[in-house]
Image (tube, rainbow, N blue to C red):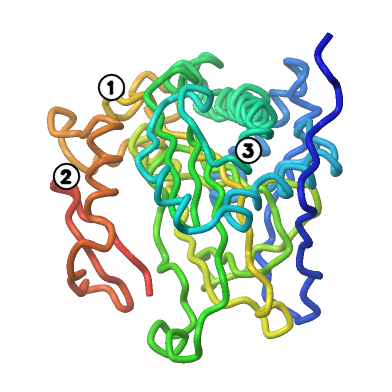
């Protein structure tokens, strides 16, 4: 009989909540317990629609993981980042495979692979798929329309980098403190304002305040909620909905003064459509037929999910961004389309 004892891991110590008064975005909180019935999903679909059209960011609670389970995931997430030396990380830099168990991993991480795999599957089947069904309902489409376009066994990558680890769409990322010189160069912006490439992004909330979204009133901070997920929309969903649901512009900035001595550990599940999906509007949606469709290009010229992912990835950091006619915006061309970066 297999052992039920979990392997021990070092305890990841999170930062205390900031005591600074920040201008937070007022985001909706989606309670996933309501998704268990058709009636509850109908109610949630309205809440999700309003959240998507207001900010494109919202919280998810009651997602199926308890607070101790979530803390355990952050403990494990820190293992390959803090418990593996740079030399060993480089050995695994080329590990790319769609399933976590099909490649080798650093020695320190190996005892935890079954838990990471279970966590990945939980994100996909118990959180992502129900959310995609709710988005489909907001478009007045059959529930499975979008979830069928985001299969678990589609093309996925797994690889290690010095401060970032990827497994089957799951990314573990650790942001460390920076020098005053670097802060001055970037004006305290760690990651410029941008839209994600995929459809939905699931970010497990952590206490270091650094994430901001661009609202009609300017940049607003994202508040940490214990054991909650932060969900945002990306390019692919904007393509598929003909601009009805916008990808949300967000950035990462220097944390408040009372949190600057702490690393910021992120656990993220990125959702992208299957590689062969053509990113054209779902014209069969009665909602899109009523509100109208804004195409970024002709359907015949639209990229597939793979083409868009590859174009965005290859372009990142590879050249000079050109200044836009719009203030504080820079541009680059990906697959013949303009991608904006917000300073």
Residue 10: percent from the left, percent from the top?
77, 52
Q: Residue at x 50, y 47 (%)?
A: 165
Query: Which residue lies under the disc numbered 1?
Result: 276
Image marks 2 and 3: residues in contact by CB distance under 8 Å:
no
Query: Which residue lies under the disc numbered 2?
Result: 335
Q: Nearer the viewer, residue 56 or 14?
A: 14
Residue 193: percent from the left, percent from the top?
42, 66
The residue most toward the top is 1
* Side of 99 where 1 appears, left or right: right
Q: Nearer the viewer, residue 141 or 255?
A: 255
Query: Mark 3 packing: few (<14 Cα in 10 Å), some, or many (20+)?
Result: many
* Side of 341 where 140 appears, left or right: right
77, above or below 242, in the image = below
CA gap, disc 1 and disc 2: 15 Å
Query: Mark 1 packing: few (<14 Cα in 10 Å), some, or many (20+)?
Result: some
**Residue 317 sits in quarter:** bottom left
Q: Nearer the viewer, residue 20 or 157?
A: 157
């Amino acid at each position: 009989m297999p052992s039920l004892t979990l392997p021990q891991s070092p305890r990841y110590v999170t930062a205390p909540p900031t005591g600074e008064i920040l201008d937070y975005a007022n985001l909706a909180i989606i309670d996933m317990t309501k998704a268990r019935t058709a009636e509850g999903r109908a109610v949630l679909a309205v809440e999700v629609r309003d959240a998507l059209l207001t900010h494109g960011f919202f919280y998810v609670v009651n997602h199926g993981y308890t607070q101790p389970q979530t803390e355990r995931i952050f403990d494990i997430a820190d293992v390959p980042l803090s418990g593996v030396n740079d030399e060993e990380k480089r050995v695994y830099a080329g590990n790319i495979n769609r399933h976590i168990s099909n490649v080798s991993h650093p020695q320190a991480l190996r005892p935890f692979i079954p838990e990471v795999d279970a966590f990945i599957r939980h994100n996909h089947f118990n959180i992502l798929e129900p959310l995609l069904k709710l988005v489909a309902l907001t478009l007045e489409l059959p529930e499975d329309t979008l979830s069928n376009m985001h299969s678990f066994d589609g093309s996925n990558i797994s690889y290690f980098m010095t401060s970032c680890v990827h497994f089957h769409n799951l990314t573990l990322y650790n942001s460390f403190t920076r020098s005053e010189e670097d802060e001055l160069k970037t004006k305290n912006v760690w990651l410029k304002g941008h839209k994600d490439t995929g459809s939905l992004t699931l970010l497990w909330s952590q206490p270091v305040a650094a994430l901001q979204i661009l609202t009609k009133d300017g940049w607003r901070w994202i508040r940490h909620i214990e054991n909650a997920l932060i969900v945002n929309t990306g390019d692919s969903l904007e393509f598929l909905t003909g601009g009805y649901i916008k990808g949300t512009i967000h950035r990462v900035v220097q944390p408040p003064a009372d949190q600057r001595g702490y690393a910021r550990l992120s656990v993220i599940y990125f959702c992208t459509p299957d590689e062969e999906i053509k990113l054209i509007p779902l014209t069969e949606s009665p909602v899109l037929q009523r509100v109208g469709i804004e195409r970024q290009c002709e359907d015949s010229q639209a990229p597939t999910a793979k083409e868009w992912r590859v174009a965005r990835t290859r372009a990142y950091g590879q050249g000079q961004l050109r200044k836009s006619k719009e203030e504080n915006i820079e541009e680059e061309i990906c697959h013949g389309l303009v991608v904006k970066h917000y300073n």
